[in-house]
Image (cartoon, rainbow, N blue to C red):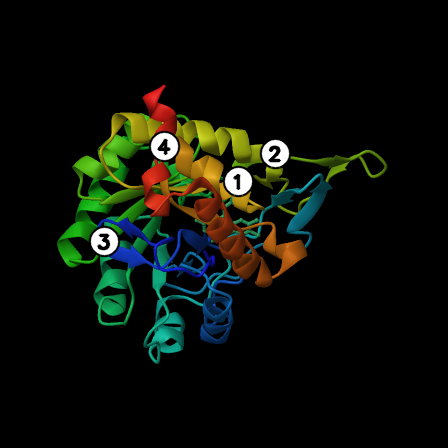
Amino acid sequence: MSIDDKNYNLSVELDKIHLRNPTMLASGILGISQSIFERLYNENIGAVVTKSISVDPMKGYPNPTVIPLGCGSYLNAVGLSNPGLHAFSKELSQNKNIPIIISLVGSSEKEFSKMVKVFDSLNILGYEINLSCPHVSKMGMEVGDDPEAVSKIVSTVRMNTNKPISVKVGVGSVDVVELSRIAIDAGANMITAINTLRAMSIDVETMMPILSNRIGGLSGSAIKPIGIRCVYEISKKLQVPVIGCGGVSSWQDVIEYMIAGASAVQIGSVLGSRGPRIFNKITQDLKKYVEKKRVANISEIIGIAHRY
Ligand SMILES: Cc1cc2nc3c(=O)[nH]c(=O)nc-3n(C[C@H](O)[C@H](O)[C@H](O)COP(=O)(O)O)c2cc1C
């Protein structure tokens, strides 16, 4: 039987969102131009998550902002540089068929409602709220560590859109399952786990932190077991789709996240070395896997780890 046989299906459902396969671009990696989204779509990606967008443009930190640490891991403090609400909505205004999820970042409910009111008329699948970036003050994880602020922001976004909302959680001071529960109670439809982990690297010659911001976020292979643990714990306790993220570089990593409970899986840092083609490679390999295992639809493997 050919691997293209329709009996072997990679499609997954995330709340109201149908994806042709479970691969997604993680926020912040190649995520600000429509032409790149089209390139990724031609490489068979399931969906694209944009760079986190704020109301006003943000310049980000000076270099160095991204450091390769070896063994597929990275440290970054880009500082959420992005073109801002209006320039980005213009960029996406011609979008017709690329499945795009807009990542939102901000400090107050007001900022989030302002963004959703503009973005909601675009041809997009939904939103991912970044409550977990670990290196920008008054945004990301500083908001995610405040349960009251999380609840207010998510319910404000909920009030302003009927589109699906995912909340991106990370490893901060509030337990990841508890934080996810607060987000779901406030109206989120799904959870993305995880963001980078707060980390630092020092140059022993200059005796200085290497990143201009000193502290940044660890991503890539080193964080995969933490991402797997978070997806497992969240999907065990909460009956909502979970999107896995952290350290994915192969089809085996995608399958591992799905067995842990992820309905879809985001891919980020590895694009730096492998480029957009990795999406086509992984989806071809996933097809071979479901055929070998005789799994009619890949979604059948979601959460199998919970059976034991
Ligand atoms: C350079 C860089 C920029 C990132 N920017 C964002 C961002 O704007 N918003 C966000 O939610 N996550 C951002 N992330 C985190 C990624 O989306 C992802 O959660 C994290 O890198 C773990 O996945 P990975 O190991 O596949 O890279 C960024 C990561 C990197 C490496």
- The residue carrying mark 4 is 145
The answer to whether any part of residue 235 appears in the image is yes
Which quarter of the rendered picture does the N terminus lie within? bottom left
Please identify, in this view, whether the residue under mark 2 or under mark 4 is nearer the observer. 2
The answer to whether any part of residue 175 appears in the image is no
Question: Closer to the N terminus: mark 4 or mark 1?
Answer: 4
Indicate the amino acid at tag 4: Asp
- Relative side of 151 to 229, left or right: left
Gap in angstroms between the C-alphas marked 3 and 2: 30 Å
For residue 186, what is the image quadrant? top left
Q: Secondary structure at mark 1?
A: helix
- The residue carrying mark 2 is 222
Residue 253, which numbered label?
1
Please identify, in this view, whether the residue under mark 4 or under mark 3 is nearer the observer. 3
* Residue that protrudes farthest toward the top in the picture: 308
- Relative side of 277 to 226, left or right: right
Q: Secondary structure at mark 2?
A: helix
Indicate the amino acid at tag 3: Pro
User: Are circles 3 and 2 on residues that touch, CB within 8 Å?
Assistant: no
Question: Closer to the N terminus: mark 2 or mark 4?
Answer: 4
- Foreground pick, 95 / 278: 278
Q: Quick one: label 3, few (<14), some, or many (20+) residues within 10 Å? A: some
Q: Secondary structure at mark 3?
A: loop
- Relative side of 157 to 305, left or right: left
Gap in angstroms between the C-alphas marked 4 and 3: 23 Å
Question: Closer to the N terminus: mark 4 or mark 3?
Answer: 4
- Foreground pick, 286 / 214: 286
Indicate the amino acid at tag 1: Asp
Which quarter of the rendered picture does the C terminus lie within? top left
- Relative side of 13 to 83, left or right: left
Question: Closer to the N terminus: mark 3 or mark 2?
Answer: 3
